[in-house]
Amino acid sequence: MESRFLGMGELRSTPSVAVVVDVMRAFTVAAWAFARGAEKIVLAGSPDEALALKARNPEWIALKDGAPAPGFDTVNSPGLLRSLDLGGRTVVQKTTAGTVGALAVRDAPLVLCAGFVVAEATARVLRARGGESVTYVVTGEDGRADEDLACAQYIARRATEDGPGTDPADYLRRARESRAAHELAEGVRLGVHPDDIALCLELDRFPFAMVATREDALTVLRPHRTDG
């Protein structure tokens, strides 16, 4: 299985399979939303689009990264989201990196959104397809975010292994020591819960992958259960 690791600015064509990685925090938050009962997540291209969707669908839950803002129900923090009851709800998510990366490859035949919390389930989907060329979109820091690159590399290794294999310790260490983790710990990034870093590093916390597809004019993320 051929693996390419690209920043969003390096995408030149639509890949056949794309794995969009945002560990801290977009796709950790998305996984927690599904764990808390959300039916689907609509990925918005801008804050204005997110607010417009919310205005048309007042029962939807709108979230963004950074500080709380008028019109949004919550922020992009797994520590804060885990206390919400989202049973059957639709979430609208807009973030600086993760949602942008997913929208950049939304026309790919298969788009998976991932972080460490769904790493094995994501790798299982890739193993099931077999023989594909996979493009890993490293969303943070123009493709240089080590937490995202470490996660992408770990999933790529696991996608070629059946059964126990790659030790995750070094990949998780890189994420723990990354610039993003430092900024979360030091309060450089806003809308943060003290548990966010630890929650982002919970390997295989959830048994599902997350697949983004086009539904009418929207890009929608849904959980995808896998065997094993």
Image: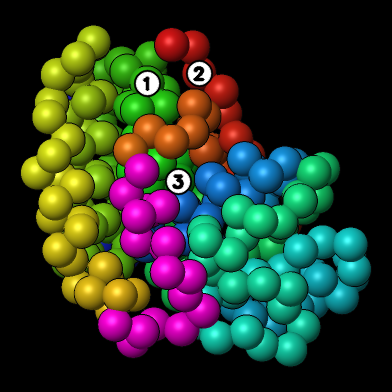
Q: Could you give the CA–CA distance between mark 1 and mark 3, rounded to whole angstroms? A: 13 Å
Image height of 148 relative to 191, above or below? above
Secondary structure found at label 3: strand
Image quarter of residue 180: bottom left
**Mark 1 Cα within 10 Å, few/some/many (few <14, many 20+)?**
many
Q: Residues within 10 Å of mark 2 (few under 14, many from 20)?
A: some
Dot label at residue 124: 1
* Residue bounds of the magenta highlight: 186-202
Q: Is residue 160 left or right of residue 224?
A: left
Q: Position of residue 85 (x, y in %)?
A: 76, 51
Q: Is residue 24 left or right of residue 36?
A: left
In whole angstroms, how far apart are the C-alphas of marks 3 and 2?
15 Å
Q: Amino acid at mark 1?
A: Arg
Q: Is residue 67 magenta?
A: no
Q: Identify the residue shown where x is 66% and y is 87%.
A: 69
Please tell me which residue is depicted at 57% across the width and 28% down the height of the picture.
224
Q: Is the Cβ of the residue at disc 2 closer than 8 Å to that at disc 1?
A: yes
> Percent x, y for residue 151?
24, 46
| Residue at which label 2 appears | 226
Kindly identify the amino acid type of the residue bearing the numbered disc 2.
Thr
**Dot 2 or dot 1, earlier in sequence:** 1
Question: Could you tell me residue 58's position as x and y percent?
Answer: 90, 68
* Labels 3 and 2: the sequence-earlier one: 3
Name the image quarter holding the N terminus: top left
Residue type at mark 3 is Cys
Image quadrant where residue 25 sits: bottom left
Residue behind mark 3 = 113
- In terms of secondary structure, what is the magenta stretch mainly? loop
- For the C terminus, the quadrant is top left
Residue 3 can be seen in this image = no
Residue at 82% x, 61% y: name it: 60
The image position of residue 113, as x and y in percent, is 45, 46
